[in-house]
Every structure is written in C-alpha cells, then in structure tokens.
Image (cartoon, grey):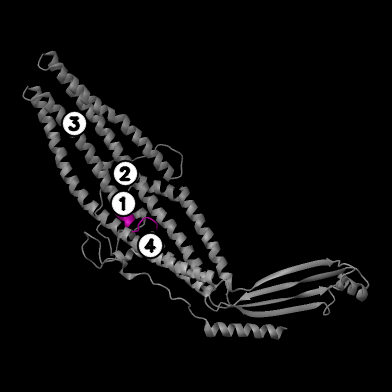
Amino acid sequence: MKNYITKIVMVAILITTLISCKVSKDIETPKDAFPENFRSASVSGDTTSIGDLEWKNFFAEQDIIELIDSAVARNNDLQIATKNIEIAQYRFTQSKWGNVPQVNLFVNASTSNPSDNSFTGLNLNQAIGAKHIDDYSAGASLSWEADIWGKIRNQKKGAFANYLQSEEVKKALQTTIVANVSKGYYNLLMLDAQLEIAKKNVQLNDSTTNIIKLKYDAGQVTSLAVQQSEAQKLTASQLIPLLEQNIAIQENALSVLTGSFPGAKERNTLLTGITIKNNTAIGIPSSLVSRRPDVKSAELALKAANANVGITKADLYPSLKITAQGGLNSFETSNWFNIPASLFGTVAGGLTQPLLNNKRVRTQYNIAVAEREKAVLSFRQQVLVAVSEVADAIVKVEKLQQQETLLQERVKTLQTAIKNANLLFKNGMAEYLEVITAQSNLLQSELELADIKRQQLSANTDLYRALGGGWK
C-alpha cells in the first residue's frame, strides 16, 4: 500500500509540475490613472512630500500632539480597525495551509440487528450463530487536492491582499482622525479668539453708549441714538453665550475623537501665536499610491479581485484529489487490536470535472471578472478623488493667504476708522450712526480674520492628509 500511495503522490506532483500555470492573466494597476502633476503646482520631478512626515513632526503644537496621541491610542473606530486586521491575519494564516493534506482521526463502533427473515439475517445466523453483528474501527483518513491550476495559490494571494487592505483601511482612518483632531483644535482656538473679540467689542460698545448718553443728557442727540447704541451692544453681547456654547460642543467632539467622556480641553497657545507653515513639498501624483492608504487599499482590492478570478477560473477545470484511509477493524472488541490481522487500508485518486454545475461555476467566474473590472474603475475613481483633494488643498492654501493679507489691511483700516469716528463724534463732527457702523464693521472683520486664520491652518492640514500624511 505504501508503494501505491507513493506512486499516486509522484504522479500528482508530476502533473502539477507539467501543467501548473496561470489560468487567468492578472490585470496590472493602470499606470495612466495618474496625471503628470497636480493643478496649480509647479512641474517638478521631485518626489519628496510633506506627506512623508510623521504627524509628530508635522504639527508643532504640543497640545495637538497630546490630543492625537490619545486619539490614536483610545479612539474606538481605530481599535475596531485593529481587530479587523487581526481577523484578516487569521484568515491569511489559515490560507497558508491550503496545500497541506487534511488528516482526521476516527473511532467508530456500530451494531446491526437484521430481520430474521431477511437474507442478511438468515446468512448471519447460519455463519456465526448470532442475530446481530458488531463492527469496531479506529484509524486515520487523509484528503489532499493538488494545486494544478493555482487555485490554492490564488486563495493565498487573495487572503494576503485582504490582510494588507485591512491595514490600509486602518491607516486611512488614522489620517482622517489625525486631521479631524488638529482641525477641531484649530477651531477651538478660533472660537477662543472670537470670544475675546466679542468681549472687547462689548466693552467698546459700552464706552460708546456712555458717551451717547452724556450727549443725550446734554440734548445733543435723541433717544433713538441711545437705543441704537444699546442694541448694537446687545448684538455683540449675544455672541458671547453663542461662542461659549460652540466651544463646549467642540470640546465634546474632541473628547469623542480621543476616546474620552466630554470635558474641557487644555489650550496653551493662542490662534495668533501659531505660525502657518509654507508647505511647498508636494511630490508627484503617482507617489500617492505609496502614501495615501485609500489609494493603496484600492490597488490591493484589484489584486484581491485578480486572485478571485484565478480561483473561479480554476473551478472550471478538473481537480485532482487523493484520499487514503487506514487503521484497525474487527467484528469483535477482543480482536480489535490483533495486529496485523485487524489492519485495513484504502487509497484512491481521481480527477473531477464539473458537468451539470458547470453553468453555475462559469457564472461565478463571469461575476469575478466583472468584479475585477469594477475594482479597476474604483481604483481610477480613488485616484481622481485623491488628486482632486490635493489640488483643492493647494489652491485653498494659496488663496486663503491672499484673503488674509487683504483682511488684515481691512481690520487695520477699521481700527483707525474707529479711533477717528470716536474723536469726531466727541467733537460733534460725526453722527452716532457712523460710530456704530464702524464698530459693527470692525467686529465682523475681526471675527472673519480669526476664521480665515483657522481656515488656513485647516487647509494646511487638509493638504497634509490629502498627500497621505498622518498614519506613520
């Protein structure tokens, strides 16, 4: 029997060696999916990019670094992604055992009581003088399928691609969380700045109202002037509880991102104290495949789809299976372990070709081919989204800088206008409406300036994330 098993295994190996080949050709990642350069970016072959920086080196504010540290360690979505990686790793490890024969141990005991009037019953009674027969078996069974058409190999490739893809999904999630934490912190600093602006404006309006009241007492203005001044003061005062509300909500949102219950967040810096970096290192679009986890994930999805096509295509061809069974068998327990009399063994090998279910198998293959074509389109779409996000961030960084410069000039002009309006009003050379209008314009401009600064910081963060930064 050993010689028979050896011959079958040798034949299987020979067949595998001679006819093992790829039954389907893989589709490569489309190289034409990337443009030569980003819009609004100078043409350059330099592949260096701020996306290569670790987030601890990109952000300079210690408060942000501590918040991101907490988010990376405690964010529940990231922990779920980690478990998904663990599951994918188990599946990949299991796929490595596809070429290993399946071996099972068995112990069986059975008894049969045929009818006395049956052919079996009559013969049994005549042969051994008994009305029932017992059967005891113990041994091992083996089953092995030769990987002729690369089915098992493709299963390994698909499992490995899915494992790597689960890692990229976590990386992509981390880049989003890093960006959201930093942008949330910048928004918090903007709200702090706007709260101070509102409080200062209330004080300014209070001073103006007192002057108008003195002029009213002197009969120089009407009660309408006092009422409009007080209304302007109330408008600025109303901003204070609104901003305090938004601050609390933003702190709560940061708490969720960092995996903690709602609470205040420490701030050791001011919005005006943050220097906006001039991030000019962008790199070339094709490098996004190695930097952006979502683009890499789409590429791995294509590899998994290639593997699935190979698996379903292999199902269309004959499969070679070898089975063997051996052990001890006896009608009586007393003779069960009587060796070699109780020894038995069977070996079988054969090719199986799908016939009636060929249509179903071919349909699965056609579906796998269509899924692969979808994966190519998904990759192209993901590249389009990635390149578009980078282009959007580049133009935002550039244009927001221009807006801030103009807005700063506007604020300076209005600050001078406020001083002049108050001086002229005290000397009776300007109307109270001019003072109120100037104060209103200054309030709005200073609030806008704080928002523009926040948008600039967020745009830099968006550019960093769009280039694939934040997961290292």
Which labelled disc corresponds to residue 186? 2
Q: Residue at x 42, y 49 (%)?
A: 69
Sequence-wise first label, 4 or 2: 2
Q: In the image shown, does 300 or 186 lie closer to the viewer? A: 300
* Residue of label 3: 440
| Quadrant that contains the N terminus | bottom right
| Left or right of 284 in this view: 319 | right
| Left or right of 411 in this view: 242 | right
* Residue of label 4: 378
**Which residues are the magenta region?**
460-472
Sequence-wise first label, 1 or 4: 4
Identified by mark 1, the residue type is Thr
Q: In the image shown, does 320 or 48 lie closer to the viewer? A: 320
Q: Secondary structure at mark 4?
A: helix
Residue 153 is situated, as x and y percent measured from the top left of the image, at 52, 73
Foreground label between 3 and 1? 3
Cα separation, mark 3 vs mark 1, equals: 32 Å
Identified by mark 2, the residue type is Tyr
Residue 234 is inside the magenta segment = no
Which labelled disc corresponds to residue 461? 1
Cα separation, mark 1 vs mark 4, equals: 26 Å
Identified by mark 3, the residue type is Ser
Cα separation, mark 4 vs mark 2, equals: 33 Å
Sequence-wise first label, 3 or 1: 3
Disc 1 crowd rating (10 Å Cα; few below 14, some 14-19, many 20+) is many
Foreground label between 3 and 4? 4
Q: Residue at x 36, y 48 (%)?
A: 180
Count the numbered circles shown: 4
Sequence-wise first label, 3 or 2: 2
Q: Secondary structure at mark 1?
A: helix
Asked whether the residues under the numbered discs 2 and 1 touch, taking CB atoms below 8 Å apart as contact, a structural biologist would say yes
